[in-house]
């Protein structure tokens, strides 16, 4: 039971390129989230989705785009990558009724040169 | 609105010594509180959570945390550190919905 998978696990790209980070869950949790983790900032919410075709901005959405056509997938796209988007990105899911417990994927380490 | 402050970005303890990680929160409603652990190159794993039941919460790997409303604190402790406890620890708060606010994290190193 894989739970949440993220791909790729590591990615190096160049400024201005488009990058898509994938997140897949084997459960049917309604909520999915994208966070970025930066030293000194903990985790900051980029975007979240309450269900398929329902997405909303989090704390730091600028420069990112999301979509959710299927419950199990929640890709995050950097339309034109910048060096400030170098970070570790985590996908998470949440099952309503489980006292707010979020489950996290293994993360994607993205470097923008 | 909720927020979390973790006191100390880095804690170093000797193997067998007490581990104490401090977390203070602010919340406009009774909070749900969490501690997550992140081992190197891994995602976050739930260590324990407080959801308005017992104020002393026991988690995995011998950790526990106590909710103190008067102090708005949720400090994490472990009586005897083990080398395998070396990791980064995050405190988080929720106001009863899906939104979590995280602290900046505390890195724990364990000296032999």
Image (cartoon, helix red, strand yellow):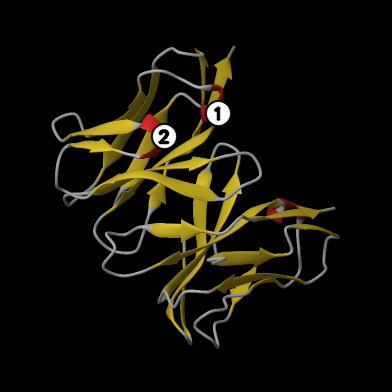
User: Relative to residue A62, is residue B5 depicted above or below?
Assistant: above
| Label 1 CA crowd tier, 10 Å (few <14, some 14–19, many 20+) | few
Label 2 marks a residue whose chain is B
Residue A62 in view, yes or no: no
User: Relative to residue A38, is residue B12 depicted above or below?
Assistant: above
Q: Which mark is residue B61?
A: 2
Q: Residue at x 62, y 56 (%)?
A: A89
Please state if B79 lies on the left or on the right of A19 as rendered.
left
Label 1 marks a residue whose chain is B
Please state if A112 lies on the left or on the right of A73 as rendered.
right
Percent coordinates x, y for residue B7 in the rendering: 41, 26
| Label 2 CA crowd tier, 10 Å (few <14, some 14–19, many 20+) | few
Residue lying farthest front?
A: A1
Q: Nearer the viewer, residue B43 or A82?
A: B43
Percent coordinates x, y for residue B16 in the rendering: 45, 13
Q: Nearer the viewer, residue B108 or B103?
A: B108
Q: Nearer the viewer, residue A86 or B14?
A: B14
User: Relative to residue B61, is residue A37 depicted above or below?
Assistant: below
Residue A22 in view, yes or no: yes
Under circle 2, the secondary element is helix
Q: Residue at x 15, y 35 (%)?
A: B69
The quarter of the image holding the C terminus of chain B is top right
User: Relative to residue B9, is residue A99 depicted above or below?
Assistant: below
Under circle 1, the secondary element is helix
Percent coordinates x, y for residue A35 in the rendering: 54, 58
Q: Which mark is residue B84?
A: 1
Please state if B110 lies on the left or on the right of A108 as rendered.
left
Which of pointers 1 and 2 lies earlier in the amino acid sequence? 2
Q: Nearer the viewer, residue A28 or B74?
A: A28
Marks 1/2: CA–CA distance: 10 Å
Whether tag 1 and tag 2 are in contact, CB under 8 A, the answer is yes
Q: Quadrant of residue A105 in the image?
A: bottom right
């Amino acid at each position: 039971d894989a739970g949440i998978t993220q791909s790729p696990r590591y990615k190096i790209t160049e400024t201005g390129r488009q990058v898509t980070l994938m997140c897949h869950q084997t459960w049917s949790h309604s909520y999915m989230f994208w966070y970025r983790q930066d030293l000194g900032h903990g985790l900051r919410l980029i975007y979240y989705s309450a269900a398929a075709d329902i997405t909303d901005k989090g704390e730091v959405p600028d420069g990112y785009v999301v979509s959710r056509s299927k419950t199990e997938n929640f890709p995050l796209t950097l339309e034109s990558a910048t060096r400030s988007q170098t970070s570790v990105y985590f996908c998470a899911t949440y099952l309503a009724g489980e006292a707010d417990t979020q489950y996290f994927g293994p993360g994607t380490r993205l470097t923008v040169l | 609105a909720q927020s979390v402050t973790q006191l100390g970005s880095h804690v170093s303890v000797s193997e067998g010594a007490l581990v104490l990680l401090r977390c203070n929160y602010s919340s406009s409603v009774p909070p749900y509180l969490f501690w997550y652990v992140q081992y190197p190159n891994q995602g976050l794993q739930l260590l324990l959570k407080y959801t308005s039941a017992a104020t002393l919460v026991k988690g995995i790997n011998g950790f526990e945390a106590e909710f103190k409303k008067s102090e708005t604190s949720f400090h994490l402790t472990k009586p005897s550190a083990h080398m395998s406890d070396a990791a980064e620890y995050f405190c988080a708060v929720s106001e009863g919905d899906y939104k979590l606010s995280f602290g900046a994290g505390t890195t724990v190193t364990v000296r032999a």
